[in-house]
Structure formats: C-alpha cells, structure tokens
Image (cartoon, grey):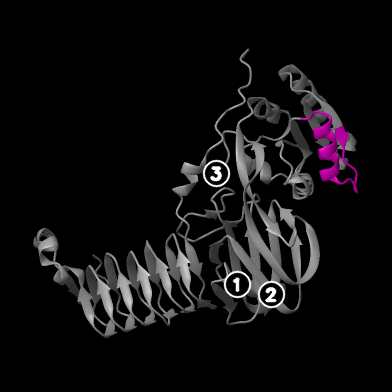
Amino acid sequence: MFQKPSVDTSLSNEEKYHEDEVETVVGPSVHVEGDFNSAGNILIKGSVAGKVSTNKLLTLEEGSKVTADIKAGDAIVSGEIIGNAKIENRLELTPTARITGDIKCDILVVHAGALVQGKVSMTGLDAPEKNSNQTSTRSRVKSKKGSDDSE
Amino acid sequence: MYVYLYDNFLRQKKYESTLKAIETRLTDFGVAGKIVRLQSFTNSEILIQDEIRRGAKTIVIVGDDDTVAKVLSRSAATDILFGFIPVGGNNTVAEVLGIPIGELACTVLSQRRKVKLDIGWVNNRYFISQLHVPASDIKIEYDEKFTVSSLNGKMELVVCNLQPFVWKRKGKGDIVVHPQDGKLEAFLRPAKKKKWFGNKYEDPSIFPFEEMSVSSYKPFEMEVDGKSSKETRITIRLAKSKIKMIVGKDRKF
C-alpha cells in the first residue's frame, strides 16, 4: 500500500508474443502472384502463382491451385499443385489432391483418389543408416482406401 | 511530472463527477499534475514538446479511442512515456491495453507497468487503432515480394494495430489481432456480390506484413483512426516499439 511505484516494471514482453503462431490465409477468390514466404502456418483456398514456402504447416484446400514450387515443414494437400513439392516431414494427399511435379518428403500419406504425376523421392532412401530406427517403428508410405480414414 | 491531456468532449456536464473522482484518486496516489484541455485544432505534437521542455516526464491521455488516435498519431515520434485514462463509451483500445474505464485506471497509471508498442505508419503519418479501405478495386503488394488481387474485383482492407479486429470463425476460436506481434496484420475481404444493403463478403484472407502498398487506377477511400481521405496509392509500414506506454496487467498481448 505504501510501496513506491516501481519505474522499471517489465519492459520486455517480446518472448511472449513470439510464441504466437501467425496464420496466413489466402481466401477462395484471392489470387497471389509472386514469391510467398511465411513464418507461420499457411492456409490456401485461392490461387497462388509463385513459390510458397514456410517452415510450418501448409494446407491447400479443395479448389485451391498453386502454380510453382512449394516448400514446407508439413503439408496437407486437397487442391492442385503444378510444380515441385519439397516437404521436410509429412505430406498428406487427400482424395481431391492433384500434383503435377516431383515430390520430396519424409513421410507420404496418399488417400485413394489422389493424383500424382512426377517423381517421388523420400529422404529415407537417400540415407538408410540414418533412418533405420525410424523405419522399424512406422511405415514409410501409407495408402488409404477411404477418404474418411484419417491417420 | 505528469501532464494530463483532457479531450474536449470531457467538458460535458455528465463527465464532471467522473473527472472529479479521477482527480481525487490521482492526488491520493501522488501522481496528480498539470491539466491541459485539447481543442479541436490543437496540434498535440507541439503541445507535448512544449510540456517536455517544461519538465514533463509522463503524458496521460484522458478520453476515448478517438483521443488516443488524435494524440498519438501526431506525437508517436516523441520520446516520452504515455499513459491513458479512458472515460466515456467509445473505449476498445483501453480493453486491449488492460486499462479499466474511469477512476480505476488511476491504479494502473500509478503502477507504471511500461511496454513498448508497435504502431502503423501510412503516407507520412502514424496510425494507432485501425486503417480501413471500404470495398474498392485495389491491388496490394506485400513486402515488395508478392501481389494480391481479387478475382471478383472489389476488396475491403482492414489493417489493425491497437483496435481489435475480431473474426468470428464457426467451430474454431475467434481471431483477435494482437497489437504487439512484431508484424501488422491485413485482413482482406473480397466482395462476393452486391446485396440490398451493401456488399456480401467472403471469409477474410489474412496476411501478416511489415510493409505493403495499396494502389488503384481510380481514387479509393481510406479511413485512418476515424479520418477519411481519398488516395490512389498508400504505403503502410510497421514502426516497431515506437510508443512507450503504461499498460494494465490484463492487457491482451
């Protein structure tokens, strides 16, 4: 009650807000042209003509279209990609996915109905000794019959 | 030394008792100071610089969202600590800053919890709360890297800083813009089709950015902190940690 107000009460809140995940959303009738980078998750419902890259999750909804290379940490594709896809971890192709280009990823999940035209290379085959422990615990490629199934 | 900037609307009789209670509380806390009443044409930047020369260490804005916008848009570049005592109904910024309305704000002021806030910069002036471009044929370029346009033509643009923009999402949590996330966030809503009462809009697209330019082949309306103007090209930037402000512990960032 009789304490003097302290002058140096915390000035830095910076650590706190850096944790917030910023989500970029491209709406259904929005067209993006040019290289498109984001630090957070990206959700694409419209069309993008240019490279898309993020370290986090990239989601392409049904009806979306990307005409260029994509690079992401993880990706769930329900739309169309005309270009190469380089995914660090897990790539999931839903029944409506269409990819015309090469795929490079660590884990690939393909639902029945997804179309891929291109080369698929997975990092496990490049360095078998590195991933030998991982292959024993999980299957590298999972093919799903029904779209209702989820991993 | 504290200097209190009272907005002109506080002259109304209905605010008399609130102001009296605030002044009593400020005296109790030992933070009372000089009171300056803002007029319609007062240039707050010159006023604040004069007060700094006279020894002011803290400038406290007393009023509502419009008062904050009016004062800070002119004097954001001034290196001084700002405080805020919200009075009246139009006070959304106070909620973001965690400052209660009326005399309770004096407690927050006396605690002096200081935070540096990011603000927006548009066409040679700062903006504090919100920038709004009603549905127009605009083209947007972000960080000189990519352009965004609508397939339907018209788009509405909202860039938020201190004033919250709440996007209600069905089945998911609402998105509320944080005033201190190191980036400004632009909400773009393409107009679907014209209805009887205005346009029908799509779900917004969200792009965090540090710099963006909005252009159009014909002049479009822009509303910044409640003031409207017609422009053909605007550049919006983020001014990081520009304002030192006293905030409450219940702030939204």
Type of amino acid under label 1: Glu
Per the model, the C-alpha gap separating discs 3 and 2 is 31 Å
Does residue B90 appear left or right of residue A65 in this picture? right
Residue under pointer 3:
B253
Q: Chain of mark 1?
A: B
Eyeballing the image, is B63 above or below A146?
above
Type of amino acid under label 3: Phe
| Label 3 packing within 10 angstroms: few (<14), some (14-19), many (20+) | some
Residue under pointer 1:
B141
Q: Given contact means CB atoms under 8 Å apart, are the residues at marks 3 and 2 in contact? A: no
Q: Nearer the viewer, residue B234 or B101?
A: B234
Q: Chain of mark 2?
A: B
Look at 59% across and 49% down and name the residue there.
B179
Q: Nearer the viewer, residue B228 or A11?
A: A11
Q: Given contact means CB atoms under 8 Å apart, are the residues at marks 1 and 2 in contact? A: yes
Mark sitting on residue B215: 2
